[in-house]
Image (cartoon, rainbow, N blue to C red):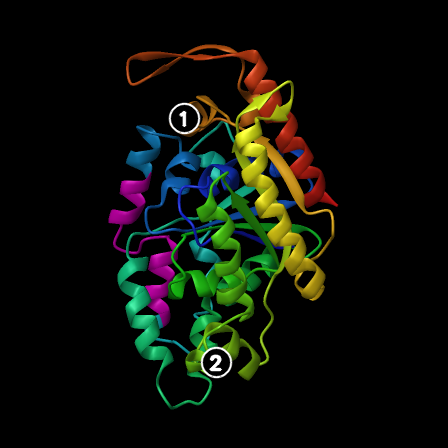
Amino acid sequence: MRYAVWNNKGGVGKTFISFVLSTEYAKNNPQKKVIVVDMCPQANLSEAILGGNGIGSKNLSNILNNADRKTIGGYFDNRFSSPHQLLGRETDYILQCNEYNSKLPENLLLICGDPSLEIQAQAINQASSQTLPVDSWKNLHLWLHDLLQACIKKYGNNETVTVFIDCNPSFSAYTELAILASERLIIPCTSDGSSARAIDNVFGLVYGVGINKAYEKLNFFAKVKEFGLSIPVINCVLLNRSTQYDKKASLAHDAMFNAIKVKVDDYESKYSVYFSTRDHFVDIPDYHSVAIVCSHLGCMLSDLNPGKKVIHDKEVQINPGPLERYQAAFNQLLSKIEN
């Protein structure tokens, strides 16, 4: 199964969620290969996976500065010279994570992020608009799908390989490629009105719901229908970073999350075909310093213990209560992924 973690709103925790989901899923499923795809030009997920701040940053720089860089941007560079057919060496762009970061499971693989995605998105849009061949838009928008299918074939099949794709908030060309390469959509939200509005954006951008008539034939969903492509269905909506008391969200957070739930449930009642299950909400409490420590050290959530940690010469305290709540919430999320 291939999962994309995306919301049209920034700052909702997509990258850290992708880090925890992929690493913990790999640990819990050692018989599978788990491929993490970093489709954000900032490549923050790649830095964490490659060792965290410091060593991870150096590893990422070395990979990016290599003449034949093994990144998603490096793959796209080569596809521009062969836009309508496979390179034949797609699996060269996969990195073995524990060769860079021994804290991570042996079955975890990475397709590294690349800042070049921003510039490449413009080139993809231009090439996709070519009138010949007639399926230019389709061929270019399946580049990531092509890459993943080759990797899945190398390591087994759809039953033995699981993919997690960290997406950028912008619905740019590289995000469109990520959506078309996935089968399930995970939507993180935070407790604010912008996250509620972002649900409307997700349904408009991905599923063409409520699109202005002037763009009915030009939007992403129209192209999907034109070329008979598949798009992911919603696997779960994460109510992320809620402040909790007595294991329940505070009144303010609960009120905002309820507004999101009402909106999602309304869409589910009208467009059930775009949902994989009706049980799609997961509450995730505020992780306080946990995300900073995990990302900085490149360590797994389940391996993190309470106590003092050193971050850039500063001591950071990880308290047991918040850590246990956050680990429990992710276990709940993993149960939805694994089922």
Q: Which residue is label 2 attached to?
A: 216
For residue 274, which numbered disc appears in the image? none
Residue under the image location 45 percent in, 26 percent down: 294
Three-letter amino acid code at disc 2? Answer: Glu
Q: Viewer-proximal residue, 212 or 319?
A: 212
Residue 196, relative to residue 56: is it above or below? below
Residue 63 part of the magenta segment: yes
Identify which residue, 219 or 35, lies in the foreground: 219
- Which residue: 74% across, 52% down? 278
Q: Residue at x 40, y 41 (%)?
A: 11
Image: magenta residue range: 60-79
Q: Of 180 and 102, which appears nearest the observer?
A: 180
Residue 89: where, in percent of width, then height?
Answer: 45, 64
- Label 1 sits on what residue type? Ile
Label 1 with label 2: CB-CB less than 8 Å: no
Label 2 crowding class (10 Å Cα cut-off): few <14, some 14-19, many 20+? some
Tag in front: 1 or 2:
2
Element assignment for label 2: loop
Residue 227 appears in the picture as rendered: no
Does residue 55 appear in this view? yes
**Under tag 1, what secondary structure?**
helix
230 relative position to 313: left or right: right
Indicate the position of residue 15 as horizontal and vertical percent values. Answer: 45, 41
Q: Is residue 143 left or right of residue 331?
A: left
In the rendered image, residue 85, in percent from the top left (x then y), is placed at: 45, 77
**Residue highlighted by disc 1:** 292
